[in-house]
Every structure is written in structure tokens, then in C-alpha cells.
Amino acid sequence: MGYSSSDDDRPLARSNGNGIRKILHAPPSRVHPSTFATNAPTDQHPRTVSAARVTASMDKALDRSVPKGSGGGEGLVVRRSNSDAMDVDSPLNNKRKSRTSITKIDYKDDSDSDGEPLAKRQRSKKALQSDSDDEPISKSKSNKPTPRKAVIDSSDDDLPLGHLAKKKVAIENAAAKEAQALRAKEAKKKATPRKSIKDESDDDVPLAKSSANKRQSNGVAAKRKSNGVKKEESDSDAPISKKAKAATPAKKGKTTPAKEKKKAVEDEQEEEEGYEWWNAPKPEDDSIKWQTLEHNGVMFAAPYEPLPKHVRLKYDGQDVILPLEAEEVATFWVAMMTPASSHHLENPKFRENFFHDFSEIIKKAGGAKNLSGEKVPIKSLEKCDFSKMYDHWLAKTEAKKNKNLSKAEKEAAKAEKDKLEAPYLYCLWDGRKQKVGNFRVEPPSLFRGRGEHPKTGRVKARVWPEQITINIGKDAKVPEPPKGHKWKAVQHDQKATWLAMWQENINGAYKYVMLGAASDVKGQSDYKKFEKARELKKHIDKIRRDYNKELKSEIMADRQRATAMYLIDKLALRAGNEKDTENEADTVGCCSLKYEHITLEPPNNVTFDFLGKDSIRYNETAKVDAQVFKNLKLFKKAPKTDGDDLFDRLTTSQLNKHLNSYMQGLTAKVFRTYNASFTMSRLLRDLEKDPRSKGSIMEKVKLYNDCNREVAILCNHKRTVGASHEQQMQKLGDRIKGLRYQQWRTKMMMLDIDPSQKKKKGAAYFQLDEDIDKEWILEHQQFLIEEQRTKITKKFEKENEKRKADKEKALPEKELKERLLVAKELEAKFKKENKSNKVEAEGRGPTVEKFVAAVQKLDDRVKVLETQAEDRDGNKEVALGTSKINYIDPRLTVVFSKKFDVPIEKFFSKTLRDKFRWAIKSVEDADDWEF
């Protein structure tokens, strides 16, 4: 329920972490006034911590306690050394910790971290990496890869903080000017009277036609006046499967089934892509999502296959027979005994929850028995030995892996999988074929959860048709449930975009089957998100002006709200929602920050340390405005202590209600999209002046990535350096070295043909690069020899697989040995070269000209790899993919692609091109589109 405006001055009753209950979203009439009137905690009422008003004396006292002046860089995350932290409120552990996902934790008994807060507990070295840059991420220390001559670190991280701060201020000033200009233009447009009655002469035209003619796509002049539907597809309300294909003249000659299938798929794709919803007239009732809807329901998990009779669980040394339901649950545990998941099995909470559910299922199903039929009480997980079950499961899993199957077996397995999935892949939405996203019902398993989830290890029960509600058109055929079952309900809700729904048993959360990312519905959702961010352009200056003014408000609730808005806007913090910490992991956002989550370091540094979305640790230090620093100190003022809310007079719903007063539909999360897209648009404007914009495609791609990276830094969207980064950089470095070595060999071949070239080109031309030593050459030569052997062996095995499939006799091993002689010859050649320091010319009709051309080609390849290496190293702390997909308007990427003649495939994969088809098509005829 929403809050009335009078709620803003009231303290919000929330848990302070000391067992005090929460009162959230309760109507004011139902909450007794005494709830807000006491400062003393009781069993019934949480305490009011902060004062309702900020007096002049409080402000003056804070001014005296906070040193003046700062080093600049307000609103930016900064790098910290291990010794520069000084908490003005409490002692701080100066040991800097990198932010990682805390999914993997060391649960061994020798850990002394059990008494520490969750965010401080020791994490194992193999902690899972997050690929998300949805939130700012710490810059953990890591060993830099071996420096290479060709790779230059151009990361913006090395830019002076003052430079970045000035850039950010310049972008914000530009945003303010643009907002004023947009509002003035809009006001002028409204004030200008219509020049001629002729403009109103279309009143008699049907509304649909009138709006179709007038409607412009995303502010871009539409090339076509129609709604984007092709003439031959004007019957788009008919089921796609029944649409008549345009007649095409028959071609002479035979057509293979594979070609026919490929053509059918292409025709289907063309048909699906014909409808351009972004050019279609906007419906009068936007809440109605569809008129007709047909689909085939959901795909259930495969039924459980019982274990062979000789594979048993051992309990206290003896084989036991488990009821079938309990045996299935035991296999869930077994499936997690792999190196990738076994760390969960060491978690005490996981073990406790699993054994609770496991033992309960055994009891309900009639109990476990030994081989003599006597009941065996299962009382301890420590006495359970799953090793026999694991051996059986592992052997079965390995046998099914693709790498262990022949080509024919792989094809058969794929064909079977495709046949099972085919009915559920697509639905008919208003007569148009749309891809369904997650049509599979989750199989039963053990719940893991994010971070230290209190329900980790619980059994996720199998979902049955009796739990599933189907949403489908009234006139459509209702999908048949599995034999002997029935659906929970069938409804025809045209305002819902889900096809099926059920409630899972762990957290009581509802799961939905939705359309795929490339569908019209998802596209419209993305379009609305970015259009809302574009709309924010008109109001951003007023919002920033107001919250900067309210940073000094006498009303505590207003001051807290303004401070939270500053942190959300400048530092890209998520707003955060209230959590039920008994049933969910204790993750927080800006509005739900606790006293212990921030540390203040004069003059204006604030260190944040909390678990954010998906239990990813946010551990960053940021420079903030002097007034914001003062406010945060005020919000931490005694009697507040650990467990108390920092913003105890603010909730996310109150904040969003306030934002909605500026612009309909505006919420805190829109700021992240707006800041990323607007910053990117400003950076792209100036690229024509950059000489790299006239370089190679690879240089232009890097130029775009540099802008994307700068967006991440200015908007504080960063991530930890991945564990595999150093290894990847080493591989790239080796590839570059390999090409240089090949280049050197080619030059030496020139000397083999014409020794006079040494005098003509100079001795330096034929020298080996300094960073390539003899030891590396020997290792690389061995790698090339092994690579040759592997290629020959794999080709031989593939040929035999094909022969087997064609029922032909396999090639003998003798044939393989003869083929492998090539690798032996290469080995002998390298030995000779190393001894003589000369390389014999290779190839047919070798000439100096051919070798010069080959050297140039290798040089071009080296440059491409060097650019890739430089780009990858610069991106080590930035997940460009996430910002590009989720926060930067895709139309900006399309405009860059067109303007600088870079194929869109360099930025968007096939999946993303399908997802952002609306963005690609809507600005394809506009070179000057701006966010």
C-alpha cells in the first residue's frame, strides 16, 4: 500500500537487527501513534533513532567536527591504499578486501570467522566470478600480466581523478542545459497556435489512419507511412502456420531436404521479422497486451529413473533401501559432489537444511530398510555414505557427454531433444509467431540461493500440473496436461504477458513462463525503459537542483531522501528494498543501508561495505560532496549503532513516490539507465575529431569500447578482475609472440634465397624480437609439433567415425602412423634450424616478393591482436557486455555502427541482434539520431 504525503515526516518502523519486529507498508490508520513516539526499544515497538528535525546547533556542531576542503573528485569511486582508511566513528580494519561473489565460502572447522558478519567471512580462493557490471565493483589487487612490448595500457583508470571529475561535471552541466532547452522547445510547441484549419482537416479520417500517418518512430522521421507490415503479410492475424507463402518459380534440378529445411527456416524468420511494432499506431488501451494467444503449455522435467538394485546408500556401514522419493533426493546430493559444487556440501546450514528435508521425506515415505527388511532410522548425515551412488551417477553422466559420443550418437541425441522441445518453442501471439523464453519447468533439486541464504540446502520439490495455472486465449485449445493430471487453473487474462505460472516451495515465489528476449513484448519493454530514460532528460536539472537544496533541509526525512538521491544518481547505487532476512539473504541497497555498512574518512571519503544484488559484495570508497559527508555523519550519530538503518526515515517506496512527482513512472532505477546512455551519447558526439575513427575496423571497435569503459568509470559500473584474466592475457601474448616468431622465420627464408637482402634491408630487419628468447622458442616449437599431431589424430578419428556411420571399413592404425610422420619431419626441421640458425625457404616457387608480402600480412595480424590485447586489458575491471546490453540505449550503438561504417555484428551477437531488432530497424534511416 502506498504512503500518504504526511508519512514523509514520520520515522519508519523497521527492524534494527536486534530482534525488533518490522512494521512496513501498514496503513497509517492501523499503526498506533505510540509506535512513533518513543526512543526506547520495547518488545512491541522499534525505537525511533534519528530526530525529526535538524536544528541549527546540530548543524554547527557537525561543521566543527568535519574538516573543510577536499581533493576534488566528488561523486567518483577512488582507489584506496591499505593504510589510508580512518573511521571518524569507529576503528576500521585496514585490510583491503576485494569484492567477490560470496557464493563459495570456506566452511572448514579451523575457520575462526563464525562470529563475524557475513560480509567479513573468509572466502575460498575459487570464489565464483560475477560477470555483471550492474553495480560498482572493487579494484582488488592482482598480479599484472607479463608486460609485452606491443601492449599499452590505455585504461582510463590511470587518468587523474580531477580530470575525471571535471569530465563528469561537464557532462552534468551539458545535461542541465539540454533539459532547459528541451522544456523551452516543448513549451514553445504547446504555445504556438495552429496556422491553418487545413491541419485539422483530418478530423473526419478514422483515428487509426490519422495516428498511423502522424506517428513518428522514436523521434525519427519514418521512411514508410505504413505500420511496417509487408503487403504480402497483411493477414498477420491468421496463425503463422496457416499463412500462404508467396508463389516462387520452381527451380530446375533436385533440392535436398536440408536445403528445403533451411529455406523454410529463412522464410519463417523473414515472416516473423515483417511486423514492426515500433512503427505501428499506439493502442488506445495499453494495458491490454494481446487479443489472441495460443501455446502448448510447459515442458515438464523427465521422470526419475530408479537406481539399479546393486547401487545403494550406505548408512553406518550397511546398505540401506530407500523409498523411491528419498532415493531421488539422495541423487540431488550426489549431483553436487562435483568439484564445482562440493563447497556447498561443506556449508553447515546447507547440510542442516538438506538432512532435515531428507529425513522427513524418508519418514513420510515409510522409512529406510536394510537388506533384511528391517527398519533403519536415519539420524545422522555424517553416517551417510553416498560414494556408490556417486560412482554410478558419474559413470552415467560421463557416458552422456558429447565428447564421448560418436557423430551419429550426437545427431540422434540432438534430434531427440529437438523433437521433445519443438511443441513448446513458439506461441502465437495475436497471430504472430513468437519465441517462448523459459518453457521448461525447473527440475527438482537442492536449493542453493545467493550468498548466505538461510534456506540453502532445502529440497526443491517436483512441480506437478496441479500447481500450474495456464494463461491462454478464450478461443484457443487448452494444452493437454500429462495423462492422469489436470491444471490448477486455466485463465484468459489479456493484461498478463505470462503463459504459465506456478509457486515454488522454497520461498513461495511465483515462477512465470514468459516470451523470449527477441519477442515483441520483451522488445517493447526494453523500448519503454530507454524511452523513460530519454524522458528523464527534460527533468534531470530540476531533480538535481532540488535534492542539492534539500541536502541542507531542516526536516530529517527530506535530508535523508536528498542524500539517498545523491548516492543513487552520482554513485549508481541501487535503491534497495526491504528484506525478510529470515527467508532471504540479507542484501541491501541505498535506502536499506545499515549503520555498519559505511565508514567515514575525512575530509570527504565514504567507504561502503555491504552485500548488494545477487549477494555480490560492494566494497568501495567514494569521494562525496562535503554536505553529503556531513549528513552521513549526522545519520550515524548516537544513539545509532550496528543494526540500525542509516536512512531510518526513508523507504524505497517513499523515494519512488517523490520521484514520480517530477515525471510519471520515474523510479530510482531509471537514473542508472539515463546516466549511462546520456554519458555515452556525449562521448560519441566528439568521436569524429578522434583520428582513430578513420582507422581500421578493429581500431573503431576499440574506440567504441573505450567510450563504453569511460561510461563504466564515470557511472561507477565496475567489476573485479576475473581469475582467468591473467591467463587469457598470457595466451594472447603467446599468440602475438608466435606470429612474430613466424615473421622472423619468413624473413630468414628471404635470406636463404637472396643473402644480399641483409645489406639492402639492414641487419636490424632480420633480428629476433628482444622478448623472444631461446627457451621460449623451444617451448613454442614443441607446442607447434604437438598441435600438428593433435590435428592429424583428430582428422583421422573423424574420418573413421564417418566410415563407421556409412558402414565402411575403418582406416588402419598404420595409416595414422604414416600421417604422423609429418610432425616428426617438423621436429627434425626445428632441430636443424636451432643448430644452424638458418631457415630453409618453404612453399612452391618461393620468391623474395612472396615472403615480403607474407611478412606484411603477419604484421597486420600482429597489430589486430595487439589492439585486442590492449582492449581486453583495459576492460579487466569493466564488464562491457552488461552495460552495453542493459544500460546504454542500443540505438546509440547502431548509430555508431552506421556512422563509422563498422558492421553491427562487431557489437551485437545474433541473439542480441534479434533482441534489439527494434533498435536496429528504427534508426536505420537516421544518421543524426540522439539519445
Image: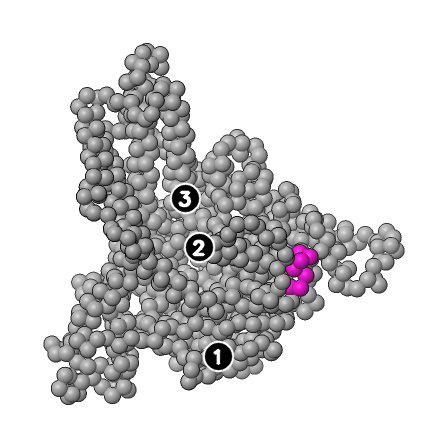
491 left or right of 743 in image: right
Residue 110, located in which quarter of the rendered image?
Answer: bottom left
**In percent of the image, x 48 and y 69: which residue is there?**
423
Query: Considering depth in this image, is 655 or 431 the residue closer to the camera?
Result: 431
Above/below status of 917 relative to 755 = below
Q: Quadrant of the N terminus?
A: bottom right
Amino acid on which disc 2 is placed: Glu
Q: Between tags 3 and 2, which lies in front?
A: 3
Q: Between tags 3 and 1, which lies in front?
A: 1
Mark 1 vs 2, N-terminal side: 2
**In percent of the image, x 55 and y 61: which residue is there?**
519
Q: Which mark is on residue 480?
A: 1
Mark 3 vs 2, N-terminal side: 2
Whether residue 399 is visible: yes
Asked whether the residues under the numbered discs 3 and 2 touch, taking CB atoms below 8 Å apart as contact, a structural biologist would say no
Residue at mark 3: 875
Q: Residues within 10 Å of mark 3 (few under 14, many from 20)?
A: many
Q: CA distance from mark 3 to mark 1?
A: 50 Å
Residue at mark 2: 135
Mark 3 vs 1, N-terminal side: 1
Please report the bounds of the magenta region as a residue range: 230-236
Amino acid on which disc 3 is placed: Asn
Give the farthest residue toward the right: 197
**In percent of the image, x 33 and y 34: which residue is there?**
736
Whether residue 37 is visible: no
**In percent of the image, x 46 and y 73: which residue is there?**
298
